[in-house]
Amino acid sequence: MATRDVASGAPLRRYGQIIGFASKPILAGQHVHTHNLAMGDFARDYAFGQEAKAPNPVTPSATFQGIVRDDGRVATRNYIGILTSVNCSATVARAIADRFRRDIFPDMLAPYPNIDGVVALTHGVGCAVDPAGEGLAVLQRTLGGYACHPNFYSVLVIGLGCETNQISALLATQQLQVSAKLKAFTIQDTGGTTKTIARGVELIQEMLPQANELRRETVPAQHLKVGLQCGGSDGYSGISANPVLGAAVDLLVRQGGTAILSETPEIYGAEHLLTRRAVTPAVGEKLVSRIRWWEEYCARNGASMDNNPSAGNKAGGLTTVLEKSLGGISKAGSSNLVEVYEYAQPVTASGLVFMDTPGYDPISATGQVAGGANLICFTTGRGSAYGCAPSPSVKLATNTALWLRQSDDMDLNCGEVLDGTLTIEQLGAQLFQLLLDTASGQRSRSELHGYGQNEFVPWQLSVVT
């Protein structure tokens, strides 16, 4: 509702920032939505680094029960993965993984209780693209990030054999080598579908005893890399679940951990709030350059940055992408922005970072996991059913009505902020503990439902010919 009269063409503010311009006169008390509010251009003062705070000393005291790999990296889950170089090998990859499904063949993994499962992550591309183009490079970077993700004990990479995305090139560009924990082969070289499935099953059976030997041990929370997501957002997202996640992010950063904010189209119009917190002007400039790339990307494809929010977002009370962005950016808490990454690049910095991704949740989270996220935190107001193997996904409801209606898919009710029963800080502390518990092996709702394989969606930038 408007709190004061707004003249036609005048800016209207929420969260103290512009969310659009009145398309007709708005009287105090009137409902503000798509019928009287529209997008418009306005200048943003990026003020690079002017609000960056002196870093607080990291005081690692929080811990979780993690899986320490041979190279010192820490996993939150222990999977065996199957990746495909091309869509043509997706069916055999799924057939191999299905042989180890506990709900179909319970005896296959029964002797291996320390293995979370065998998952096939397939996709719809890998051929008929420019072999030297950006699209193939992004796909290879994404697959490479998953191939060496700490949540995978070992990985099979399966191709057809004649595709553009040759496995040899994939391994070379990502500096990967075939080893006891990384096997690669093609359907054509192996001798067809039946033989390829049999070989894949045999290789995984050989890997299982070693994968099962791993045990969890106490490690500091600085080993957590949490991807921040919001999907099915509503008008409550920016005042309950997203600020709660932001409070948990601040706690994580103070422990030396890493939080990855993403979804570039969904910070559009609010990016100046991040550039002000950049630790250097160069970091702020990196973020602005990604915003400019998106503006050009949309322009050359005849699209608009305001095609976001979705129909469900608007039904939930959001009007413009500016309003959505201001709510979404609160997931980042108040910590300094320390680095900006392109899609699926390895995240090596500690603290709050940004990764350039689309706003579509499966594509965005796929990039975060490729970058090393070993946990995903996902806020929703309309209701979301989502998982992200091999990294567990924790889902937060923005309002109690959603929690009561869809608690089967939710892990935490942030509607208690709206109900007045808990503060943002109290729920943020609860969420931080939930993240530690989940990282220690407590299964999230999406894991209990078996989500994660179908949600692997690499960003497709290629021109398909």
Image: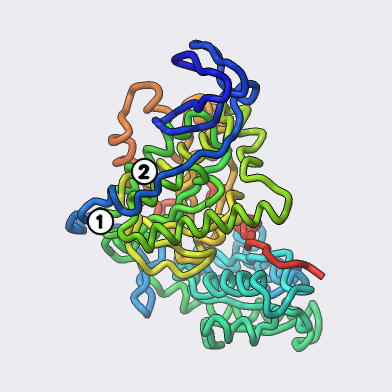
Type of residue at label 1? Gln
Q: Residue at x 54, y 36 (%)?
A: 233
On residue 255, the disc is 1
Q: Secondary structure at mark 1?
A: loop
Spot occupied by residue 295 in the image (x, y as percentages of width and height): 60, 52
On residue 215, the disc is none
Task: Choose between 186 and 134: the one closer to the eye.
Answer: 134
Q: Residue at x 35, y 60 (%)?
A: 281
Q: Residue at x 72, y 83 (%)?
A: 186
Task: Choose between 271 and 48: the one closer to the eye.
Answer: 48
Whether residue 195 is visible here, answered yes or no, is no
Whether residue 23 is visible here, answered yes or no, is yes
Q: Quadrant of residue 412?
A: top left
Residue highlighted by disc 2 = 246
Spot occupied by residue 42 in the image (x, y as percentages of width and height): 51, 39
Task: Choose between 147 and 335: the one closer to the eye.
Answer: 335
Q: Residues within 10 Å of mark 1 (few under 14, many from 20)?
A: many
Q: Residues within 10 Å of mark 2 (few under 14, many from 20)?
A: many
Q: Residue at x 54, y 31 (%)?
A: 20
Type of residue at label 2? Gly
- Image quarter in which the C terminus is found: bottom right
Marks 2 and 1: which is nearer the front? 2
Task: Choose between 76 and 261: the one closer to the eye.
Answer: 261
Spot occupied by residue 293 in the image (x, y as percentages of width and height): 57, 58
Q: Secondary structure at mark 2?
A: helix
Q: Quadrant of residue 460?
A: bottom right
Marks 2 & 1, CB-CB < 8 Å contact: no
Q: Earlier in the sequence, mark 2 or mark 1?
A: 2
Spot occupied by residue 137 in the image (x, y as percentages of width and height): 62, 74
